[in-house]
Image (cartoon, grey):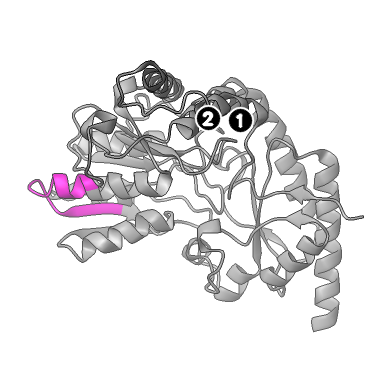
Amino acid sequence: MNRNIYMDYAATTFIKNEVLEEMMPYLKGFYGNPSSQYSIGFKSKMSIEFARDNISNAINCKSEEVFFTSGATEANNWAIKGFAHGNKERGNHIITTKIEHESLLSSCRYLEGNGFRVTYLSVDEEGLIDLEELKNSIEKDTIIVSIMFANNEIGTIQNIKEIGKICKGKGVVFHCDGVQAFGKVPIDVKELNIDMLSISSHKIYGPKGVGALYVKKGIKLHNLLHGGGQERSKRGGTENVASIVGFGKATEISFNNMKEDMERLTILRDEMIDNLLHIEGSFLNGGSGNNRLPNNINIAFPGINGEDLLFNLDRMGVCVSSGSACQATSMEPSHVLLALGLSKELAKASIRISIGDETTKEDMEYVCENIRNIVDRIRMVTE
C-alpha cells in the first residue's frame, strides 16, 4: 500500500491537536458575541485579546497594533489599498516587486487603475532585489514600499533589515508580506523597521480563515471593511473567535519551538536538495543557505512537465505542488520563476516541495527515490 506523505506545507498546514483543543470551548460553551455585555461574550473578548498579545509578543510590537483579518489576502489588500487611499495627498507612487503574492500584485493593478503609479522591482536569479535599484526608485511622491519577507514559491528571504533602513531613511512606509516567514524565522518589526506586516494562521498549524495585519502606531490607514466598532473601529464584522484563539495558540507554539524546528528542517531540506540535484540536469530555483526558508525546495527537471510529475507522485501518495496554491488551477507558468529569468518550459518543469512538522528522513528518501524514478521513466518515454 502506498504511503501518504504531505510535502506542501507552504500551501497550508494541518491544525495541531493543542490548537484544536484551545479552540473547541469557543465553538461550544463560550459562543457569545465578543461585543456583548454578558459573561460568555466577555470571555470571548478576553480570549481575543490574549491571542493578540501572543502575536504582538512574537513580532515585538504593541498589542493594539495588531488587527485580525480573514487571512493574509485581506491583510495585503488592506495594507496597500488602505494606505494608498489614506495618504494620496502625500503622493501616488508605490514600489513593490515582480515576485509578490498575487493578492498584493492584484491590489497594485487595481490601484494603477485608480490614479496610482507602481514600480515593479526586478530580482536576480535567486529572487533577491537590488538594493540600489530600490534606492533609486524612491521618488518624492513615493508613499509606500511593499516587499515580501520570504517568497512563497522559491523560499528566498530578502534582506529585510537593509530594505527597512532604506525606507526609514527616505521617509517611506514599509509594508512586508510576512506570511511564509512568520513562525519559521525570527521577525522583530522594530529592529527591521517594518511599518506593516501581513501574517496568516494556516501556515503555522492554525485554522484557515484568519490572519492579521500589524500596523505601526501613527500609520494612517483607510478601512477596507466598514461596519461596527470591532478591531478598534478599523475592521467591522463579528470576530471569528475560535479561529483567532487558535491563531494565538499556534503562534505561541511556533515561536516556542522555532529554533529547534529551524535546525531540523534545514538539515532535511539540504539533504533533500543534495539528493535531488543528483538527478541529471536538475537545478535549484531561488536562494541558498540562510537566504532560503528552512522548509522550502523549488527544483526544476528540464524536459519534464511538472504537472505530469505531480500526477505521478500523487499516485504514489506524495503531495507536492508546482507553485502557489492560490494559482494551482492556472495553466500559465509561475510569474515568480519567469521573473528569475527562466523560460516558460523550465518554469513548467519546476516543482515546489515544502516540508514541515511530520516530515521525516524516511519520507524524504522515499520522495526523492520516487521523483528520480518518475523523471527517468518520463524521459525514457519522451526521448
Q: Give the residue at the far bottom of this rendering.
A: 383
Residue visible at 56% across and 47% down in the picture: 155
| 4 left or right, relative to 346 | right
Residue visible at 45% across and 43% down in the picture: 158
Q: Amino acid at mark 2?
A: Gly
Q: Secondary structure at mark 2?
A: helix
Mark 2 vs 1, N-terminal side = 1
Q: Give the residue at the far top of this rendering.
A: 39
Q: Secondary structure at mark 1?
A: helix
Q: Are marks 2 and 1 in contact (CB under 8 Å)?
A: yes
Counting from the top left corner in percent of width and height, residue 121 is at 35, 57
> From mark 2 to mark 1, how far is it between C-alphas?
7 Å
Counting from the top left corner in percent of width and height, residue 183 is at 54, 31
Q: Please tell me how crowded label 1 is: few (under 14), some (14-19), or many (20+) other residues with Cα within 10 Å.
A: some
Q: Quadrant of the image for the N terminus?
A: bottom right
31 relative to 330, above or below: above
| 201 left or right, relative to 36 | right
Residue identified by numbered label 2: 246
44 relative to 324, above or below: above
Q: Is residue 93 magenta?
A: yes
- First to last magenta residue range: 82-95
Q: Amino acid at mark 1?
A: Leu
Q: Quadrant of the image for the C terminus?
A: bottom right
Residue identified by numbered label 1: 20
Residue visible at 60% across and 75% down in the picture: 345
Which of the pair 209/327 is nearer the observer? 209
